[in-house]
Structure formats: C-alpha cells, structure tokens
Amino acid sequence: MVAESIGKYKYKKYILKYLTKLKILLISIIDGGIYFMEIFTSTQVGRTFIIRMERGDYLRESLIELAENESIKNAVILSGIATFEEAFFQMSITSGFPMEYHVEHLKEPLELASLDGTIINSEPHLHGVVSNPNKTWAGHILNGCRILYLGEIVIQELLGNQLKRKPDKDGVMLISENGGL
C-alpha cells in the first residue's frame, strides 16, 4: 500500500512537472471534464503607480486613461479604496451558458472597501466590494463609478509578456499570451 502510494505520488509529480513546463497545469477532473489553469509569468516588475482621485472622477475610466497615457499594457491592482456617489456593479446570475448578468446601479454614498483586478492589454478588469451602513454589494465594476470624496489606487506594472483577453467557445474572456487559446 505504501509503495503503491509513493508510485502514484511520483507519477502525479512527473505529470505536474511536464504540464507546468507547457504552462498548463491540470487542476481537476470532475464529471469526466478536464479543467486547466494556465500560468503566465511576468519576468520583470515595472513602475508602481499611486493614484489619487478626487470628487467627480470616474474610477474605471480614469484607469483606462492612465493605461493609455502611461503606455501600461499589463498590471495588477495592489490596493484600492474610495468613496462613491454612484456605482455600477455587474453580478453573475446563472451558473451555466449562456452567461446572464444583473447590473446593480447604486446612487448613494458608498464606501469602496476593497478593489482587486488586473489591467490586461491596457484594459482594466476590476472587482470590488462597496457598502453603506445597511448593505454590502460585490461584483464586477463597470464604467460610471463616480468618486464622492476621494479614491486611492495602487497599481504595479508587469513587464515581459504580451497578454490579451480572448473569448473561449462560451464567450468567457480569458487571458491569453501571444494569441493563445
């Protein structure tokens, strides 16, 4: 039994090593389906941007403008906080295909408690959590999120790869490298 377990471990380790070299890692086999996680490696870290937004600025639109003006191709959002006077969030409402979404339009004072995301090929993909004293919302941040008092965002530029988003067969916009998928 122990020898058999060790043999299986070595076999799994070999497969994992082989797949990682191909930049594709097998992570799960469920109901006969094989699911992959693709890994992209940035070989260099570029500039760090600390952005202050003021009343009336728009979050996503400002990050698009920053990416264009500073020629930021790929980056990760390290931190983000803000207050909004208006926000638009998109949330999935199905677990199958075709994908369906609900858009929540909030027009009231809100705290942006968390902001996460990436900039891929100069296009921000943002998720956040906002709240008022009575309720909390989370989801994909759309255009139109207007700063009430201030916003502070920290972005780390990633260099050394050519990433873009490309739709898969179901229309999910996946990160790919050099035209992959």
Image (cartoon, rainbow, N blue to C red):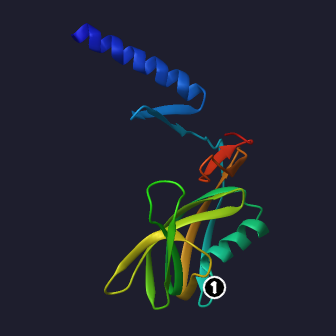
Q: In this figure, which residue is indicated by the disc labeled 1?
A: 57
Task: Tell me what residue is drawn at x 21 percent, y 10 percent.
Answer: 1
Asked whether, in this view, residue 64 is left or right of residue 99, the answer is right
Rendered position, 169 above or below 147: above
- Residue type for callout 1: Asp
Residue farthest toward the top in the current orientation of the protein: 3
Q: Is residue 43 visible?
A: yes
Task: Tell me what residue is drawn at x 56 percent, y 71 percent.
Answer: 153
Quarter placement of the C terminus: top right
Task: Tell me what residue is drawn at x 66 percent, y 71 percent.
Answer: 63
How packed mark 1 is, by other alpha carbons closer than 10 Å (few <14, some 14-19, many 20 or more), is some
Q: Is residue 114 visible?
A: no
* Residue 70: percent from left, percent from top: 76, 66
Residue in the foreground of this view, choosing between 46 and 90: 90
* Residue 111: percent from left, percent from top: 43, 82
Asked whether, in this view, residue 49 is left or right of residue 78, the answer is right
Residue at disc 1, secondary structure? loop
Asked whether, in this view, residue 160 is left or right of residue 29, the answer is right
